[in-house]
Amino acid sequence: MLRSTPMADAMPDFSFWNDGVLSQRQLIELCNAGILTGPDGLKELCGESAIDLRIDGTVYELKRGSVKPFGPRYIENLQAKELVEKIDAEPDGSVTLKTSKTYLLPVAERLDKRALLWSLECYGQATAKSSIGRLDVLARLIVDGAKVYEGFTPECLRGSTGQLFVEVTPITFPIKVREGDKLTQLRFFKSSPWSVELTDAETSNRVLASSDRSLTVSLKPTPIADAEGASKAVAFKAERDPTPPHDAIDLSKKGKIEGTDPSTYWKPQPLNDDGYFEIEPSAFYILRSAELISVPRDIAVYCRASDEAVGEMRIHYAGFVHPRFGLDRTDGGCGTPLIFEVRGHNVPVLLAHRERMATLVLYRMSEPYQGLENSVYGTQTLKLSNHFKPWAENES
């Protein structure tokens, strides 16, 4: 393992920071102070309003399935009860995670609970990275000391070791992981998230030109080039259990050059003649919102399913929406849709155009984000994970 960042001798005074989501500059200050430690390159993981977390290369299989966080000494208790089994890596350092199995992956980064408790009233909120959710992979952060997934409070840190883990379950595609891969991201708040939530109509209008923070599904066809030539699609459907089976998707490879060819993993889906789109049982789909989002520099967004289970399908959006998303597009456009990941349950469901799918939760930033980075998904339309090559030349 690479060396870790030492804790600073003298802690900075964070009391003058405003309540809200911490910005990239503030996250770097937390790293400088030793509140978050990890291998070299830690500061480069700090994004607009969250920090990416890397796995340390160790992989455990949860032999009897997922085990909900239950407080301090999480991994030690699982080992004592023989609920985890360590998986050896291949000679190239990779481990293949099989579908429908659950794994526990320790995170290379670590929280210094003493510094957090001493310096500021700090809360954490986590979510899988967009590139992971779009692979139909469930990835949930576990903070030692917490009793729920995806975050921490000052109270749970008091008994914590500061260790972080990602519980991972691939559903449709097997994936290949290595030390340093980034599956999840962590957002820090000064004061509680609910105390800095923005619910006024004026703020909603700034983000999506509507006082209603609801998101609906778009069934407007998008030009997609498939194996039979040009077509129009409203969704991508994952091709599960083909013959021969899919190769594992290597998370170390992304983009136009190294990414996986999507053509055998996905199939573009047209709209039914009656104007509905059918969600089939146990199938996984990528759809997009009808609304276009533009996030100002002083706001951070979380997209929450209106109802996690709507009828006989599950809706979720993996990934935070950061400041400047859809705001300063490189192509000159204004606003960007969000992606819905939808899984059918036991019976078919028909979706209608502009059917409500999710609600935006808007948070105040502790300070406006001042950087210039543009999201890899900032100009997306109907877009797969960036672990796949672009479907066609016209795909952003």
Image (cartoon, rainbow, N blue to C red):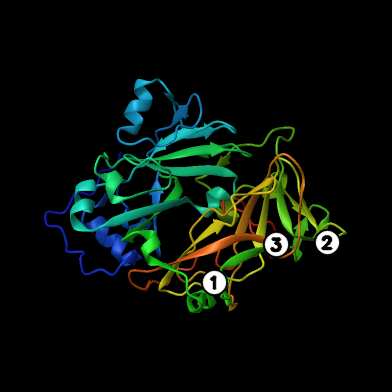
In depth, the one of 384 and 136 nearer the eye is 136
Q: Pinpoint residue 272: horizontal percent, then vertical percent.
A: 84, 57
Q: CA distance from mark 2 to mark 3?
A: 12 Å
| Sequence-earlier tag: 2 or 3 | 2
The local secondary structure at tag 3 comes to loop
| Sequence-earlier tag: 2 or 1 | 2
Residue sitting at x 33%, y 72%: 367
**Does the residue at mark 1 contact the one at mark 3 (Cβ under 8 Å)?**
no
What crowding class fits label 2: few (fewer than 14 Cα within 10 Å), some (14-19), or many (20 or more)? few
Whether residue 118 sits left or right of residue 209 in the image: it is left
Q: Is residue 380 above or below residue 277?
A: below
Q: Pinpoint residue 219: horizontal percent, then vertical percent.
A: 74, 63
The local secondary structure at tag 1 comes to loop
- For disc 2, the marked residue is 275
Of labels 2 and 3, the one closer to you: 3
Q: CA distance from mark 1 to mark 3?
A: 22 Å
